Amino acid sequence: MSDPHLGSGSSANPNLVLTLVYFLTIAAILIGTAVYFIVMARITDPEVRLMELITTQREVQHLIDNLSSQFSNFWRLPLRWRSMKPYYTHQTLSWIFILALVASVVVLIVALALDLAQVARISTLTYVVSLNALFMVRQHLYYIRRTYLTYDAEHYLVLDTTKFYYFDWSVFNVVQLGILVIEFLQLLSFPIRDLLDALYLSKNQQLNGNSDGSNTASFIIGIITMFANLSSKFYVIQFWFLVSVIGCIVLVMTVIHTYNAMRPHRPIAIYWVKYLLPLANLLYLPMLVMLIGSAACLSKIGTEDASDSSSGLLRCDSPSVVKPLYLALTVVAYTAGYVILTAFVTSFDRIPIKGEIHYKSQGVAFLKNMSMLLSIDFLLVANSYRHIRSILSLVIVLSMVCFNINTQPCFVEQINYWRTYGFCCILWVALIVTMLTNEDSTLSDTGTGGIVSALAYPMRIFDF
């Protein structure tokens, strides 16, 4: 029996192709990174290599100190009003979000036990939003207090005053540029996917046709952005893969921390942690967004959105999927993955060399968190609130544009300029999506060529 989500004339299974591309891309990135550093270690002069290892060890130790400070600041919440001074706002908001987290967990457990699909969906959305908001508030407080929490205040003073106008074309910078392009495409895919789903859903309701065009577009977007749109048979594979990866990350961190605490005189060398940062930045959105997609798909089972073409990045309607178990594991995996990955990618605060593409950690923290809020908005908000979803996306992307202009998070001004332009392009697409999805008749009367022309308008400023 053919997959109902595939087109009738398909000669190959697009879901299988996308699954293979997804895992092969991850394998190629891991193998390529390992080969590069092995080759560089062999061709580099031993003395130079030794100095690089010493510098790397110092930078990684600074990263670990920042990571420890973030976790310490995250968990230390004063109960008394006097103890909150002078950060009353941060501490009060933190307790509000914690109460929302606890309440949403209780409601989610009851909803899963009583099979209340709509309640489970709302509680899942509340939990994820509260978790992200809590972590953002705690991180903001950390950046305010970190001069007092860390041992090197002069280090951050240098970071705040460092600025470059141009970058060189080193291997490291090429990798950073590649990550920037992929992140731009990943964020751009959310409003485009929402528009395509609404467009083809509107036409299918009128013509009673299939959704081959929507499936094809989703397939292409999945290839480019590494956001897989999987059918039922592959959902289980990717779900357990992501849960296993996050479980291994938690296990490795626990073992290393415990061992180094018990044997401080012979600790495990952790200089290799630095080399995981580009991988963490590249896979940050794909991993967490797939967990958000899993939560969105599972929470929509039993609701009116479950049969829509825009029911999420994943299709989890396999009989072998036990909704309570998979949704509970998704929430736990997302909690661990989001907290660990976000803290990790925002803890690397070394002073860059001239011409190197590097970012201030507070800039990384804000933009990563806003990217996650954008994905939550498009994946977890119900289709019946599509207009509110579009307006929220405008607010989120506009805040990213304003933040990038105001704080200049990259040390290289050229990158800040192009990043701002990229966010403006995403804002333009989100605005077009908001207008076109306002009424179904607008989608029906608008041709594909007109939509493409409207979306491509920002690129006309470069026509000479």
Image (cartoon, rainbow, N blue to C red):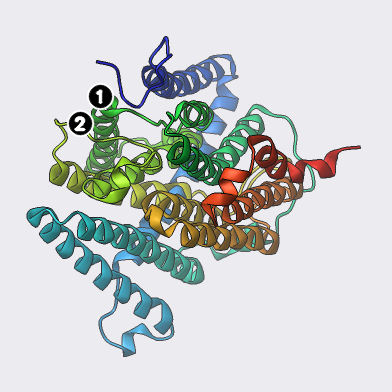
Q: Residues within 10 Å of mark 2 (few under 14, many from 20)?
A: some
- Relative placement, left or right, of 178 versus 207 is right
**C-alpha span from label 2 to label 1:** 7 Å
CB atoms of marks 2 and 1 within 8 Å: yes
Residue extending furthest toward the right: 464
Q: Is residue 333 above or below residue 385?
A: above
At x 55% / y 65%, what residue is drawn? 153
Residue extending furthest toward the top: 11
The quarter of the picture where residue 357 lies is top right
Please tell me which residue lies in front, 35 or 385. Answer: 385
Q: Is residue 174 above or below residue 323?
A: above
Provide the residue designation for mark 1: 233
Q: Is residue 424 above or below residue 234?
A: below
Residue 267's spot in the image, x, y percent? Answer: 30, 39
Residue 124's spot in the image, x, y percent? Answer: 27, 56
- Relative placement, left or right, of 161 versus 232 is right
Quadrant of the snapshot with the C terminus: top right
Q: Which mark is residue 349?
A: none
Residue extending furthest toward the left: 113
Residue 16's spot in the image, x, y percent? Answer: 36, 18
At x 42% / y 22%, what residue is drawn? 18
Q: Which mark is residue 318?
A: 2
At x 44% / y 30%, what residue is drawn? 211
Amino acid type of the residue that numbered disc 2 sits on in the rendered structure: Ser
